[in-house]
């Protein structure tokens, strides 16, 4: 038997005896004074007996309990992003417009019959810097050079027509961020022609000339590996201000003509950043 129960029972009996001596029924007193048990738990007390309306510390409008109830319904905090996720999000939000550096070469020739009669298809070389390779419209700045055999009366047999020029192009990327990227371009530039490897020029060709050009054409770019670029294009250049030739280079009465329109095909290799 539980010792605390025995002691409680003894105290209740003693108290009953005192109350009996004072005129109260011992049974009622003992029954009312018995300690609570697991079978008879004590009833909750509510202040003055009016429940939540008067003095109940656990009533529903208690601010402390309202705060606790609100805390139970708040959503769980969002976990902090990992460094890898942050780096990926930053990379996707700051996509580079694309900058490319390319070097290459190809072949060139003239479009007019007059120049095809005295020159052969020659070689070309070039260097280009491109901005906006991943955008619908980009910009190119380029240096171009060329060398062609030239055979005319009054020139040495090993004479060459050397060309050097620069140009600025607008590039229209049809599929901007694709691995295989077709594009078209157009712009403006200049080219300086000079006849070299001849001691005395007694032909009706000028020793040198500078012309204004409008290049236009189309190409196909390929991205490969980690930033590699391969670029193939065809170009036609309309030339203006030709003082190098007459309408017919073999004509004894030279007149200013427009015979330096040219075409070219080139392949370039480079990197994209």
Image (tube, rainbow, N blue to C red):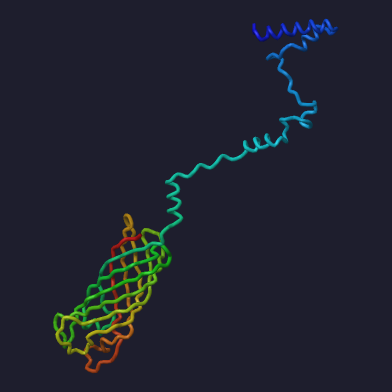
In this view of the protein, which residue sits in the foreground, 24 or 67? 24
The residue located at (38%, 71%) in the rendering is: 185
Q: For residue 255, what is the image quadrant?
A: bottom left
Q: Position of residue 153 (x, y in %)?
A: 17, 87
From the viewer's perspective, tell me whether residue 239 is left or right of residue 65. left
The correct choice, above or below, for 14 with respect to 203 in the image is above
The residue located at (72%, 13%) in the rendering is: 35
The residue located at (30%, 72%) in the rendering is: 143
Q: For residue 156, what is the image quadrant?
A: bottom left
Q: For residue 154, what is the image quadrant?
A: bottom left
In this view of the protein, which residue sits in the foreground, 201 or 26? 26
Q: Residue furthest bottom?
A: 253
The correct choice, above or below, for 154 with respect to 80 in the image is below
Q: Quadrant of the N terminus?
A: top right
From the viewer's perspective, tell me whether residue 111 is left or right of residue 65. left
Q: Position of residue 72 (x, y in %)?
A: 62, 36
Marks counted in the figure total: 0
The residue located at (45%, 44%) in the rendering is: 82
From the viewer's perspective, tell me whether residue 217 is left or right of residue 47. left
In this view of the protein, which residue sits in the foreground, 110 or 51? 51
Q: Position of residue 139 (x, y in %)?
A: 38, 69
Q: Quadrant of the C terminus?
A: bottom left
Q: Position of residue 125 (x, y in %)?
A: 25, 71
């Amino acid at each position: 038997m539980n010792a605390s129960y025995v002691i409680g029972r003894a105290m209740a009996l003693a108290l009953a005896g005192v109350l009996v001596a004072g005129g109260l029924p011992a049974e009622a007193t003992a029954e009312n004074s018995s300690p609570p048990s697991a079978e008879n738990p004590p009833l909750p007390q509510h202040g003055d007996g009016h429940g939540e309306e008067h003095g109940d510390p656990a009533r529903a409008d208690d601010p402390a309990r309202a705060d606790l109830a609100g805390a139970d319904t708040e959503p769980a905090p969002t976990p902090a992003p990992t460094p890898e996720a942050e780096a990926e999000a930053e990379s996707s939000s700051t996509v580079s417009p694309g900058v490319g550096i390319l070097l290459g070469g190809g072949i060139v020739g003239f479009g007019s019959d007059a120049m095809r009669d005295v020159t052969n298809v020659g070689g070309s070389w070039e260097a280009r810097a491109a901005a906006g390779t991943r955008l619908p419209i980009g910009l190119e700045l380029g240096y171009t050079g060329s060398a062609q055999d030239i055979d005319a009366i009054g020139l040495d047999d090993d004479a060459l027509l050397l060309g050097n020029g620069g140009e600025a192009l607008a590039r229209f990327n049809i599929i901007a961020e694709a691995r295989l990227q077709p594009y078209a371009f157009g712009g403006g530039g200049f080219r300086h022609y000079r006849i070299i490897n001849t001691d005395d020029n007694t032909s009706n060709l000028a020793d040198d000339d500078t012309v204004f050009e409008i290049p236009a054409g189309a190409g196909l770019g390929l991205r490969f590996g980690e930033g590699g670029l391969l670029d193939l294009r065809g170009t036609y250049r309309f030339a203006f201000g030709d003082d190098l030739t007459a309408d017919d280079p073999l004509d004894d009465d030279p007149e200013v003509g427009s015979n330096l329109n040219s075409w070219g095909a080139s392949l370039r290799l480079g990197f994209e950043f």
